[in-house]
Image (cartoon, rainbow, N blue to C red):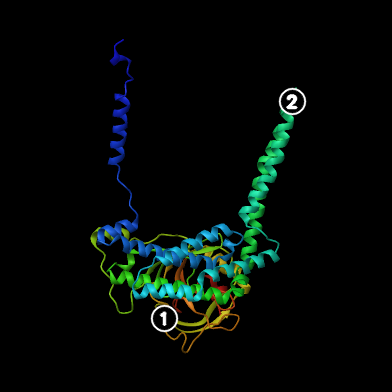
Amino acid sequence: MTEQENKPNTNTDSSGDEERNSRRSRRPVRKTQAQLIQEKLGMKQEDISDIEEKLFIARFLDYFSEETLDFIFKDKSVDKYLEKLTSKIETLGTNEDDKLLKIKFEETKIDKIILQVKARAEAAATENGFNTSADKRLRKLSFMVTIPLLVVITVLAFIPGLDYTFMFPILCVFCMLPQLLKGTVLRKWTRFKEENRNDIYTINRDDIAVLKSYVQEVLDNIRDKLLDIKVPLQLIKFVLHSADYENLDLINQKAFKGLTQYYYTFAYPPGMEPIPIPENLKQLDQPISIKTQKPEKAEQNFIVLTEIKAKEGVIEQFAPRLRKEIAGQINKMLNESDFASAPIDFTKIIPSYGKDANIYCECGEVVEIINVQICTWKNEFQYYLFESARCNCGEKMYILSVTDDTDNVPEELRDIFSS
């Protein structure tokens, strides 16, 4: 063989690699919504990064405020979040609004408040028999099940002539046991969260109020920035776990596993016309379609507006009535209904609210309405569902009302809406 024949033939491999690289280069690169908005509107990279970082700050503090129990006994995770949070605060801009955010963060000691709230929640969990997170407990139980199984298998492997048929039932039990334990732990943890969420909120009310106040300032800062650089607010969509904030438009909401996610865009200041969306970005202005928007858990705090005087969706007069005794019927009706955001604001639905008419929480405080939905029961009957902000006592109220006093209430629902 010649020297040339003795050399390995690399031409095929090389051409194959080139072909694969060529195919990869021809694939369209998927861009995020932020990248598309940046490109189409000619935004600076630092502007879009600034908005994304501030949204992270708002979303983390909001989630921590609403679901504190998800962070207990997770020191490493919380430390990482705090490190990321403080890092983003330190890298905020030098304009006056950003300076105010930095000052407010330092003056209110947001990072220390987070640790204080977490410590109180952990103390409450310990009193209820929880001294570690559900994840750690699951890992510990899995380890406790796996180790004995490995020991048994290892010992039996050294016994000559042993019939291993009897091992199959044992293996089945050991395989099923981790799933059974997991289900038991998660059910117990979920029940604990549901039963103690309001208590955790109550004992941390003042600190959580500070956190949410800071979230509001961050959100307002983002909105002002978007308006300054002429970004259509309706293009910026994000998720929060609370409906307690102002200057936002609720697009939709979804309830699952005891949590409610609220989908928002920023609201324009009163009297300001929306900034037009360029043609090349109109595909991003699509509604978020979520079929189930009602609370997943069985709510009890229902108020029904009776003695209604209402016409074409505007309620002129009503008498609120607490209906906990028929909560089961109301939840059944909600489960059989479709939901959509109301086309008009609550202030236009009940114009006299807060002046001549009020709805009260069980603790006696006036209820603040933060969300209004039009519900359609079996494509036959429409009614309002008003959701309140969380009261100082930690409770939320859900208020039901017909939209017009001339509507015929189906016989199945008359017990709910009757006086």
Q: Position of residue 398 (x, y in %)?
A: 53, 73
Figure quadrant of residue 122: bottom right
278 or 143, which is in the foreground? 143
Q: Given the image, on which type of amino acid does mark 1 rest? A: Thr
Q: Earlier in the sequence, mark 2 or mark 1?
A: 2
Dot 1 falls on a residue whose secondary structure is helix
In the picture, the quarter occupied by the N terminus is top left
Which quarter of the figure is the C terminus placed in? bottom right
Q: Nearer the viewer, residue 322 or 387?
A: 387
Residue with the mark numbered 1: 347
* Residue 263 quadrant: bottom left
Kind of residue at badge 2: Asp
* Residue 113 spot, x, y in % from top left: 55, 71
357 relative to 135, above or below: below
Mark number displayed over residue 163: 2
Left or right relative to 240: residue 225:
left
* In-front residue for pair 352/10: 10
Q: CA distance from mark 2 to mark 1?
A: 78 Å
- Indicate which label's residue lies in the foreground, 2 or 1: 2
Q: Is residue 262 visible?
A: no
Percent x, y of residue 316: 44, 85
